[in-house]
Amino acid sequence: MQTLDWIVLSVYFLMLLAIGVWAYSRVKNSADFYTAGGNLPWWLSGVSHHVSGYSGAVFVAYAGIAYTHGFTLYVWWAFTVGLATLIAAFYIAPRWSRLRIFASIQSPTEYLLVRYNLSTQQLIAWTGSIIKIFDTGGKLAAIAVLLNVFSGAPISLGIFLVGGVSLIYITIGGLWADVWNDFGQFIVQLLAGLTMFVMIILKLDDGISGVFSMWDRLPDSHSGFFNDPFTLSFMMVMLVINFFSYSGGTWNLATRFISSTSGRTARKAALTSSLLYFLWPLVLLYPMFASPIFFENLADPTLSYGKMVIEFLPQGLVGLVLASLFANTLSMTASDSNTVSAVISRDILPVIFPKIRKYSHKKALKLARVTTFSFTLLTIIVALNASYFGGVFGLIITWFAALLGPISIPMILGLLPMFANSDGKAAVISILGGLSTFIILKVFPLENLAIEIGGPTLVSFLIFVLYGFIFKKQPSEKVKELHLNLDRNH
């Protein structure tokens, strides 16, 4: 990186801090801090949902998969996310916004107390918070790897830099700082992504037809929809996992819907995010697909994107791309910190310390900032020790994807009246069944990636659904009222 690149990156960081300071003036209470007071417009919520759905890990772990396996990455990742979010737009997203309107929730696990019971809510809140520490730590480690490739800076320094900036602006600005950073980073990402796309087209010397002719210069398997171990069954597993994740099982994504002004607004936000997932990754991932043409037999394929940026972009533009990658990661890690903080301060700490329920608006806001700071600090510690958990890919794919399903199934299906017969006991048994499956598959691994990643989710889903079908326990009046309110067209 040259001086101009560092200047571009510094300007980006200053923009983040400016957004945080501006957002500080808009945050008067915990509702403003966690849900933007329920005032997010559909376009801002939709862009934020999209941007918060992927991080710098895309340019490390996923870039490595694009290098070794080709187009299948788009099929099992971006396409399944787009389809999952499209389905969620009609069946799930509006219900999150109505929960805030009718039940005044600020965290995605808050409604579980009414839908199930206290023990179920606590199990999901605690388990999800712990899992998120590892997931967010993996994303911090990913961007630190890229900074190392670009500048030679130690990975630990990159983790402290990214984590530190995130810690500052999200702690002071809350969700408003988060979503406006998302919008700013989307603009930066568009500029950086289109620049890389055009530069690779020029380097291929085939004009715009290079978009298609490029595949003739790659192994045949790289142009296929499926490339072992990323098979059709793996794609279907990822579609299921992504449905539960992007409809709100990943808590920071639920917050985008919760903070929307109405159910209709939340639906439009989800449709916007879905459309972006179908289209934008085709441009964003293209340089990664082309990387084997320029760099053959890389010892570490995860470094392929970083090498392309350094090789092909002029001064200043390297800083722009790096700013884009930082923005990707910061948008996700910051929104994770904000949402997990809501779960901790609204659903976990009041059970341990009941007097918190009587806090004034000022004291509740102070608690929100303290928990946000503490969670972000923990993720930095995990990032520094990412190698102990299977590296970046291990943290984000193997751990998070496999553990996400068991805790998200009761959350998402609990919103739908057709699963009203599955009570708190069904939720707890399904979670424990999924987590046990995860442990068993770790102790006795199978040579099948689809089963390894999807096994816990499938087991949890079957237990939750079959329990309600077999025992047919009638829901309480509170649960019936909850579902009635969520069905209303507001």
Image (spheres, helix red, strand yellow):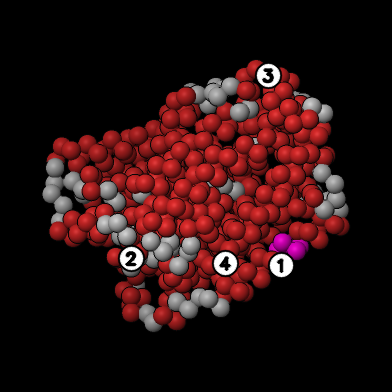
Secondary structure at numbered mark 2: helix
Q: Distance between the residues labelled 1 and 3?
A: 44 Å
Answer with mark 3 or mark 4, whichever residue precedes in sequence.
4
Q: Residue 109, image x and y in percent?
A: 35, 58
Q: Find disc 4 in the rendering and name its residue.
A: 177
Q: What residue type is labelled 4?
A: Ala
Q: Residue 229, image x and y in percent?
A: 53, 24
Q: What residue type is labelled 1?
A: Leu
Report whether 183 appears left or right of 316: left
Q: Residue 21, image x and y in percent?
A: 62, 74
Answer with mark 2 or mark 3, whichever residue precedes in sequence.
2
Q: Find disc 3 in the rendering and name its residue.
A: 219
Labelled pair 1, 3 in contact (Cβ < 8 Å): no
Q: In this view, does 373 lie above or below 440?
A: below
Report whether 147 appears left or right of 56: right
Q: Residue 378, image x and y in percent?
A: 54, 59
Q: Which amino acid does label 2 sit on?
A: Ile
* Residue 37 image-quadrant placement: bottom left
Answer with mark 2 or mark 1, whichever residue precedes in sequence.
1
Residue shown at the point (75%, 64%) measured from the top left: 11
Q: Find disc 2 in the rendering and name its residue.
A: 101
> Quadrant of the image for the C terminus?
bottom left
Question: Range of the magenta residues?
Answer: 10-14
Secondary structure at numbered mark 1: helix
Q: Find disc 1 in the rendering and name its residue.
A: 14
Residue shown at the point (54%, 23%) measured from the top left: 226
The label nearer to you, 4 versus 2, is 2
Q: Distance between the residues labelled 1 and 4?
A: 13 Å
Task: Reply yes or no: does residue 11 show up in magenta.
Answer: yes
Secondary structure at numbered mark 4: helix
Q: How far apart are marks 3 and 4 (CA)?
A: 44 Å
